[in-house]
Each structure stands twice: as structure tokens, then as C-alpha cells.
Image: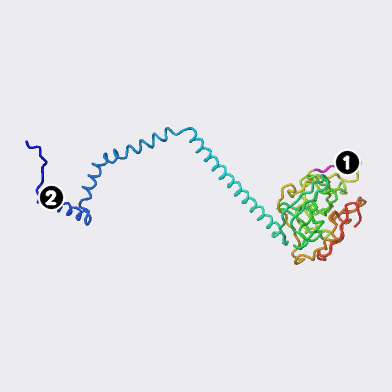
Amino acid sequence: MDNSTVRLPASSLIALAFISILLMVVDARTQHLQFVRSMLSHATQPMVVAATLPGAVGRWVASQTRTDEQLSVVNDKLAEENLLLRARLQKLEALESENARLTNLMSASASAGENALLAELVEVSLEPFTHRITVNRGHNSGVYVGQAAIDTNGIMGQVTGVTPYSSVVTLITDPNHAIPVQVRRNGLRAILYGLGTKDHLSLPYLAPQSDIVEGDILVTSGMGGRFPPGYPVARVTEVMADANEPFLEISATPQAKLDYAKQVLLIWSVAEGPLAQPVDPAETDADAAPADAVPNDAAGEDAEATGPQATDAAPAAPEPASTAGGSQ
């Protein structure tokens, strides 16, 4: 047998080339060879797998032999990314909560028919028995002495000092603060005093036969012209009667969240129109107590009657403030 290379005649090569070209044209123009292509693909699949197997094995071996140091680096990177994402999530939740608080804050005054000026808390008094805060709105924003401050739950206090760019708000828990209130259930009027503690208020000078019980809500009466009527102020927490005392001992808790508020609303009645002309800061006494205070010698008389009389005048020229123990 001849071991020499078999050589195809030129005519055979030409025929094979022609057949190949014909098959390519038929495959490109028609779908007749689709089945043949599929069968050939299945037949060559083992060769494709065999060709890609070395690379896959190499990657697997590399992943299995990764050092502890590399794993530690990857773990640290993932931990850092996790902390970053959690921090962003916390900020998003904080922004959502703040947005909800601001929405509730603005609706609190709108639903009651009042105009409102939003202010940010910038400072809290560090004196243990002086309950005052400073907000970032002042004379230039139209803030005036005696203007009421509220949060989403109720009355916080009133403005007692004004500078061009900030104001001092004396809270209702301040020992020099008093506010005319009435029991929402039956309209009983009284004066609510601060005691210098954040959770306790006093309602003195009510006779033992007064119709007031634990759980009653105290709202602003509107007397004195400082606080718009109808805003929640406090909830009665204790009513004690002593046979040896001429008046009831009544304690109450503020409705406003005095220790948590970051924003406050400075409100004024819609009927009063725009903010009145502010008081000259040079004439403002930041340490003055609110004008709603009443004399201590008012015991025995109707407490509301001893407070400042309500007027129809705009708050442009509020009456001079005085301490709870002074005269109006």
C-alpha cells in the first residue's frame, strides 16, 4: 500500500467548494438547514465544553485558594458599604419624620384659623428653674412680645423677648408664667401657673365645689388677648380636696412636648391681619414675665376675672409684661 499523501483532483476541490458555497447561500436565504445546524451544534457541544473547561477549573481553584488576607479585605469593604447604606437610610428616615412633623405643625394652626410663622429652636436656657428657649425669628421677621408659640400638640409658651434675628420664648412651665385657661368639657375658667418643673403645672384658686376632674383637658380661654382661644394647654392629672384648705389642689401636665420640639410655630389670629409692628428691641425686657400673670392676692375671687382683660386691639402694642406675683 502506498503511504504517500492522497491528493484530490482539482475537479473534486472545485466541486466541494461549489457545494459549500451553495449550502451557505441556502442556509442564509432559507431555513431548510436549521435542523442540520441544530444537530451539528449538539454534536460539537462536548468539544466546546472541553475547550472552556481549563479556564473554569482555573477560576475555581483560584477562588478556593484565596488567602485569609484577601477575604478580610473584601469583608471590610462590604462592612463599610453596609454602614454607609445604613447611615443614608437613617438620614432618609429622619427627613421623612421631620417632614411629617412640619406638615402637622403647619396644619395645627391652619385648622384653627390662625396665621403662623415657623421658627427653629436654636438655644435652651441652662438655668434649672428658668424654662425658656431661643428661636431664630425676631424683630426683622415681625415677631412681637406676647406672641403665642405652639407645637403640634398645644401651647408651648409666649414670646417675652425680641431681638432683630431671634426671640426668647418663655414656656408655660416657667415659674413666672401664667395663662388663662378653661376646662374644655364645661367651660370652667381658671389661671394655669408654671412651677419650674417640666411635667407639672398648678391650677390654684378653685373652690372645692368646682366641676373639674382628673383627665380634663385645659384649653386657652382667649382672655387677656395674648393666646388665641381653643388651643390645648394641659391635662389635669390630680385633683385633691383638703377640708382644711379653701381651695382645691390641682396638678396638670402640659400637652405640648416641651423637651422634644425642634420647630415651633409663632401664631397670630387671622382676624388681626398681618403681624403687628414689632416692639423696639431696645425697649424689650427679655427677662419680663408674660402679661397673662395675675396677682397672688386674687384668692377668693374668680381667677379668670383677675387676669388681664381681653381687648380687640391688635398685638402691635401689647401691655407691659409683669411677673406672676405683680400687678397688671
- In the picture of the structure, the residue carrying the numbered disc 2 is 13
Position of the C terminus, as image quadrant, is bottom right
Q: Amino acid at mark 1?
A: Asp
Q: Residue lying farthest left?
A: 1
Residue 240 in picture, x, y percent from top left: 84, 42
Q: Residue lying farthest front?
A: 4
> Dot 1: what SS?
loop
- Report the front residue among 318 and 192: 318
Q: Amino acid at mark 2?
A: Leu
- Report the front residue among 121 and 271: 121
**Magenta span of residues:** 238-244
In the rendering, which numbered label is found on residue 242? 1
Residue 3 in picture, x, y percent from top left: 10, 37
Q: Quadrant of residue 30?
A: bottom left
- For the residue carrying disc 2, how many other residues have a C-alpha within 10 Å: few (<14), some (14-19), or many (20+)? few
| Marks 2 and 1, how far apart at CA | 126 Å
